[in-house]
Image (cartoon, rainbow, N blue to C red):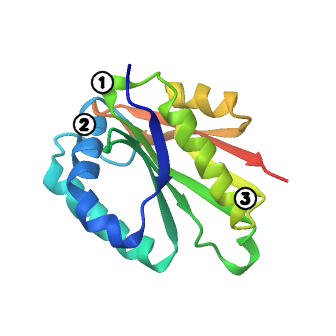
Amino acid sequence: MSQPLLVDELAASDLESAIPALSRLLAACVATGASIGFLPPFDAAEAAEFWRKMAVQIRSGERRLLAARRGGIIIGAVMVVLAMPANGRHRAEISKLIVDPSIRRQGIGRALMTAAEALARREGRILLVLDTRSGDVAEDLYASLGFAKTGVIPAYVRSETGTLDSTTVMYKLLA
């Protein structure tokens, strides 16, 4: 029997010790073509630098980081961006949903997104926004969770092969 999945928020005090696991996870996702802002070659050292930069925003409360664990091992993560301008404090942005490539399609991304939505609700947010490379499996996941497509921006992201891909912008009203 496999270990149960636990999704919870990583406290700012736990960030430093989690950076190696988060870095390996992020590097593995980039290596398998995830469109999350990075291109190969990308290694765990570069990923660690990214997480250290994010740690500043997480500690300040601008971002919140949720981690999915099985047997104490981080196998997925997502960030909820709460830092918005004064006229946008009713919304939050979903950022960097990542799941260990070797165990995708087991409900981990769905569990992370459900937890992210719950966190946003607790923070008084009534609107979630995100973008994803058009046609990625994540787009189907978001749609199945009730996110609506607002539009597609052509030539928005460069893929690992060098082509320019479209991105789909999506939202979900929580109220």
Residue 28: mark: 2
Check contact, mark 2 vs mark 1: CB within 8 A. yes
38 left or right of 122 in image: left
Residue occupied by mark 3: 121
Q: Residue at x 73, y 63 (%)?
A: 125
Residue occupied by mark 1: 102
Q: Position of residue 169 (x, y in %)?
A: 63, 43
Establish if 143 lies above or below 43.
above
Residue lying furthest front in this view? 1
Name the amino acid type tagged 3. Arg
- Residue 167 visible in the picture: no
Secondary structure at numbered mark 3: helix
Q: Spatial distance from mark 3 to mark 2, Cα to Cα?
A: 31 Å
Q: Position of residue 41 (x, y in %)?
A: 16, 41
Of 80 and 135, the residue lying toward us: 80
Q: Residue at x 60, y 25 (%)?
A: 140
6 left or right of 52 in image: right
- Residue 20 visible in the picture: yes
Q: Position of residue 99 (x, y in %)?
A: 39, 36
The crowd level at tag 3 (other Cα within 10 Å; few <14, some 14-19, many 20+) is: some
Of 163 and 85, the residue lying toward us: 85
Secondary structure at numbered mark 2: helix
Is tag 3's residue or tag 2's residue first in the polypeptide sequence? Answer: 2
Name the amino acid type tagged 1. Ser
Q: Residue at x 58, y 30 (%)?
A: 139
